[in-house]
Amino acid sequence: MLNTHIDKTNSPIIVTEQLGKTVPTSEGILHILSSVNLIIKPGESLAIVGESGSGKSTLLSLLAGLDTPSTGRVVINGRDLTKLDEDGRALLRNELVGFVFQSFQLLPGLTALENVMLPLELSGHAQAEAAARALLDRVGLSHRLTHTPRQLSGGEQQRVALARAFVTRPAILFADEPTGNLDSKTGAYIIDLLFELNQEQHTTLILVTHDMSLAGRCQRTIRLDAGSMV
């Protein structure tokens, strides 16, 4: 059983050491990330910015344990991800992590309520429906509980995704271009909601974005250029 107790002291919640990612290509080794060293404190909000292809989403995937590094290591809440197998990383994610993606990634055959209930049901939560209803009400969708994703607008789908991400009260929330598929007005509303929920739950927020005004709302910003921090 993993130790998923969150250290409330000043200990970092995420540390990376010389983190790197390479992939073989027909033209040789492609360096996607090189020697990334990060220390992220509990409750901190961090934006990762950079041009397309700079390695932002790869870094996010490595920090979340969705991908494995070629060099270096990632430590989340004192656990070295490189020493865990996929089942161990998945268990750690289930206990500590929430995700919001550009493409929403809702299950099309489930209603809004069922999509938000799902992570709670998978963890055996006794009050999954009540908790999911409360979060959907918090994001203004109490009138859309029985609607499937195709019956919802893009902004409504992203609100469902936010509710699903926060319903487990994650210690860390990873958001990858969360407004990328939304118009500017809807995107601004979603971002306000994201930061409100993040503040209410004291979550550590790690946000990938190309929007510098959005990055500016985070406490700290790091920039990637060709896979290196600058």
Image (cartoon, rainbow, N blue to C red):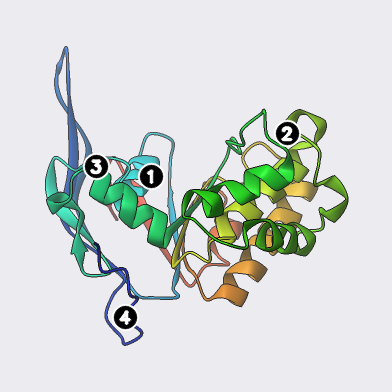
Label 1 neighbour load within 10 Å: few <14, some 14-19, many 20+? many
Judging by the rendered image, the residue that carries numbered circle 4 is 7
Q: Nearer the viewer, mark 2 or mark 1?
A: 2
Judging by the rendered image, the residue that carries numbered circle 3 is 86
Q: Residue furthest right?
A: 143
Task: Determine which quarter of the picture holds residue 156.
Answer: top right
24 lies above or below 145: above
Task: Determine which quarter of the picture holds residue 179.
Answer: top right
22 lies above or below 35: above
Quarter of the image with the C terminus in it: bottom left
State the separation of the CA atoms marked 4 and 3.
24 Å
Residue type for callout 2? Pro
Judging by the rendered image, the residue that carries numbered circle 1 is 56
Percent of width and height locating residue 47:
46, 59
Judging by the rendered image, the residue that carries numbered circle 2 is 149
Give the residue at x 58% y 60%.
166
Give the residue at x 20% y 39%.
21
Q: Earlier in the sequence, mark 4 or mark 3?
A: 4
Relative to 148, 74 lies left or right = left
Residue contact at pointers 2 and 3, CB within 8 angstroms: no
